[in-house]
Amino acid sequence: MMRIDHIAIAVRSLERSLKEFEAIWGLSVASSQQADSDAVREAMLPIGNTSLQLLEATTPESTVAKFIERRGEGLHHIAIGVDDIVAALDRLRAAGASLIDEVPRPAGQGRMAAFVHPRTSAGVLIELIQEAPPAASEGANT
């Protein structure tokens, strides 16, 4: 089963953008973190059954900084939640999709992620996300 996990927006200033999204749209930050591996600071703002993810580059070399330099602020990617990311990548590969990540990589909150090249999706970068598996102790009787 697939679902929209989040919609990512590249911003120049996370602080400024958060103030705008809070004041204008009434959204509040559910979580934020700095992802050094991707050279970004991010904040998740729940909206309905999904979230908006605001991304600010922390270095001029990050993909988000390069994106803003080329295109300005705006839609960076759409993240699609999948139950089995390896099976989803296999299916996409077999269908002829151009994959940025051939294998899943760690993402925030213990999740796994893989990106699909924009040429596969009408110019939109797609991120596949698989939730972290439940801890072995969850649901166990103690």
Image (cartoon, rainbow, N blue to C red):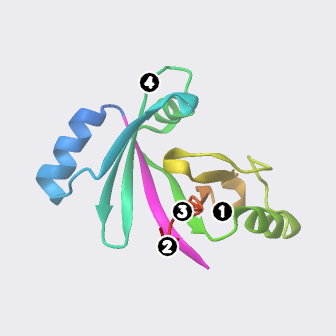
Q: How many marks?
A: 4
Q: Are marks 3 and 4 in contact (CB under 8 Å)?
A: no
**Name of the residue lying farthest toward the top:** 60
Q: Are marks 2 and 1 in contact (CB under 8 Å)?
A: no
Residue nearer the viewer, 83 or 91: 83
Question: Is disc 1 surrounded by few (<14), some (14 to 19) or many (20+) residues within 10 Å?
Answer: few
Between the residue at mark 1 and the residue at mark 4, the CA separation in whole angstroms equals: 27 Å
Q: Are marks 1 and 4 in contact (CB under 8 Å)?
A: no
Q: Is residue 77 left or right of residue 25?
A: right
Identify the residue at horizontal 15%, vertical 59% (top origin): 26
Is residue 3 covered in magenta? yes
**Which numbered tag is attached to residue 137?**
3
Q: As shown in the figure, which amino acid type bears the numbered disc 2?
A: Asn
**Which numbered tag is attached to residue 58?**
4
If you read the primary sequence from the N terminus, does the residue marked by circle 2 or circle 1 appear first?
Answer: 1
Between the residue at mark 2 and the residue at mark 1, the CA separation in whole angstroms equals: 45 Å
Q: Quadrant of residue 120?
A: bottom right
The residue tagged 1 is 121
Which quarter of the rendering shows the N terminus? bottom right
Q: As shown in the figure, which amino acid type bears the numbered disc 1?
A: Ser
The residue tagged 2 is 141
**Name of the residue lying farthest toward the front:** 142
Residues drawn in magenta: 1-11
Identify the residue at horizontal 55%, vertical 60% (top origin): 135
